[in-house]
Amino acid sequence: MRLLNIDRSSDDTFYRYKMEPVAVKIEGRGNGIKTVLINIEEIARSLRREPKHLTKYLSYEMGTLSSIDEDNSKYIINGAHEKERVQEYLYNFIDELVLCKECRNPETDLFCVPGKKTVHQKCKACGEEAAVKSSNKIMKILLKDLEDVDVGKDSEEFEDFQEEDYVFGK
């Protein structure tokens, strides 16, 4: 299977950050039709994000419900959705929540700042730290799931900050 660049604006064949193209399987018929995201765990691992967040983002963008069975690794979006459409929304997720806004590198971590109801992104490559701007409902889920971290440069915790404690995809 041919791997895709995580940054869709890069056409470099030797681009270091790759992911598998999304694979979907449509099950059922009539009102019970659903799209199973077959390789969402591998894609989420490549992006260093949680598969449940990826699935929820896709369902919110497509205007459908989703169901997640983490025990059996089954991620489902209600309705019949073409692979190309799901891949396009996946790239939107990458643009909003994975790539650094400064250097477009996917080596980023998400965290919450205490007292503020915003999700922030910190790039491991260039050090850029910025609030994530997204109109998707996934931000509410991220605010619940992410831990509050005070990583201000003036804070004493900045020196004790352990990035691996607040990273998705462990």
Image (cartoon, rainbow, N blue to C red):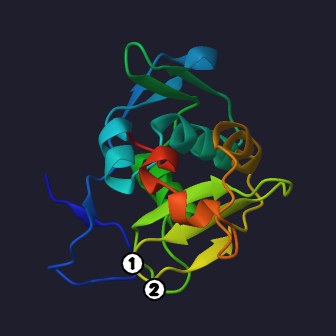
Does residue 12 appear left or right of residue 71 in this picture? left
For marks 2 and 1 on the same chain, the one whose residue lies earlier in the sequence: 2
Q: Which mark is residue 103?
A: 2
Quarter-wise, where is residue 111 in the image?
Answer: bottom right
Q: Are marks 2 and 1 in contact (CB under 8 Å)?
A: yes
Secondary element at image label 1: loop
Secondary element at image label 2: loop
Foreground of the two, 99 or 112: 112
Query: Against 153, is 155 above or below?
Result: above
Query: Quick one: quadrant of the C terminus?
Result: top left
Q: Residue type at mark 2?
A: Cys
Q: Residue type at mark 1?
A: Ala
- Farthest front residue in view: 156
Image position, residue 47 (x, y; %) = 39, 55
Quarter-wise, where is residue 72 in the image?
Answer: top left
Residue at the (50%, 26%) spot, across then down: 76
- Mark 1 neighbour density, 10 Å: few (under 14) some (14–19) many (20 or more): few
Q: Nearer the viewer, mark 2 or mark 1?
A: 1
Quote the CA–CA distance across marks 2 and 1.
Answer: 8 Å
Residue at the (55%, 63%) spot, across then down: 92
Does residue 92 appear left or right of residue 7 in this picture? right
- Mark 2 neighbour density, 10 Å: few (under 14) some (14–19) many (20 or more): few
Image position, residue 96 (x, y; %) = 60, 66
